[in-house]
Image (spheres, grey):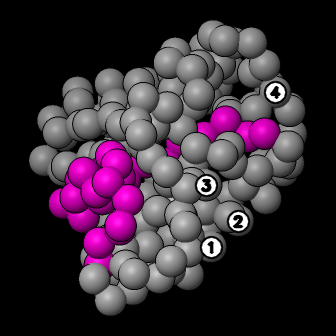
Amino acid sequence: MKNVLIISASPRKGGNSDTLCDRFAQGAEESGNKVEKVFLAAKNIGYCRGCGVCNSTHKCVQKDDMAEILDKMVSAGVIVLATPVYFYSMDGQMKTFIDRTVPRYTEISNKDFYFIMTAADTQKANLERTMEAFRGFTEDCLDGAREAGIIYGVGAWNVGEIKTTSAYDEAYEMGKRV
């Protein structure tokens, strides 16, 4: 059994990327894993202020929901990062979240990472910029991070359209293989 943490950066519950998170979770749970999803839009997470205090204290000066999420990231064995793609990059919620990992990013080590991206665009290649940003965080900043799987949910503009794409079944099957 693995401890799976899903970070959903969708601004809407039940949005396309959030739907793929739930589908991934269903597969992972059915395979006997412990799964928790964090819906970032429901959390109070301020922007990084760049004050540098956390460089020595490993604690952020902001008193918000990020400290609890960092605890979950450190204890998880598998982390799923999911975002809608806006203007060829991750959305603001995901970028703010990643920026706020600074106090404890050195403790987020030896994890398997899965990535879920959704977009109205129909070309997977156009989501590669987003994937490169994710790789900058995981591969370049986190010790022992392993890229375990990527879901490109393309061709979904309106809420629910993702269910008619191959990504819907891919998310379930990828979750089962965790």
Residue at coordinates 13% horizontally, 47% vertically from top-left?
Answer: 1
Q: Secondary structure at mark 1?
A: helix
The disc placed on residue 95 is 3
Q: Which residue is mark 1?
A: 136
Q: Give the magenta part as a residue range.
A: 58-86
The reply to whether dot 4 and dot 2 touch (C-beta < 8 Å) is no
Q: Residue 65 lies in magenta, yes or no?
A: yes
Element class at badge 2: helix
In this rendering, the answer to whether 61 lies above or below 31 is: below
* Label of residue 120 in the image: 4
The residue drawn where x is 24% and y is 37% is: 35
Amino acid type, mark 1: Gly
Residue flagged by tag 3: what amino acid is it?
A: Lys
- Horizontally, residue 61 falls left or right of residue 157, namely left
Residue 132: mark in rendering: 2
Judged left or right of residue 55, residue 166 is: right
* Gap in angstroms between the C-alphas marked 3 and 2: 13 Å
Task: Check contact, mark 2 vs mark 1: CB within 8 A.
Answer: yes
The structure residue drawn at horizontal position 53% and vertical position 63%, both measured from the top left corner, is: 48
Give the alpha-carbon distance from disc 4 to disc 2, as whole Å: 19 Å
Q: How many marks?
A: 4
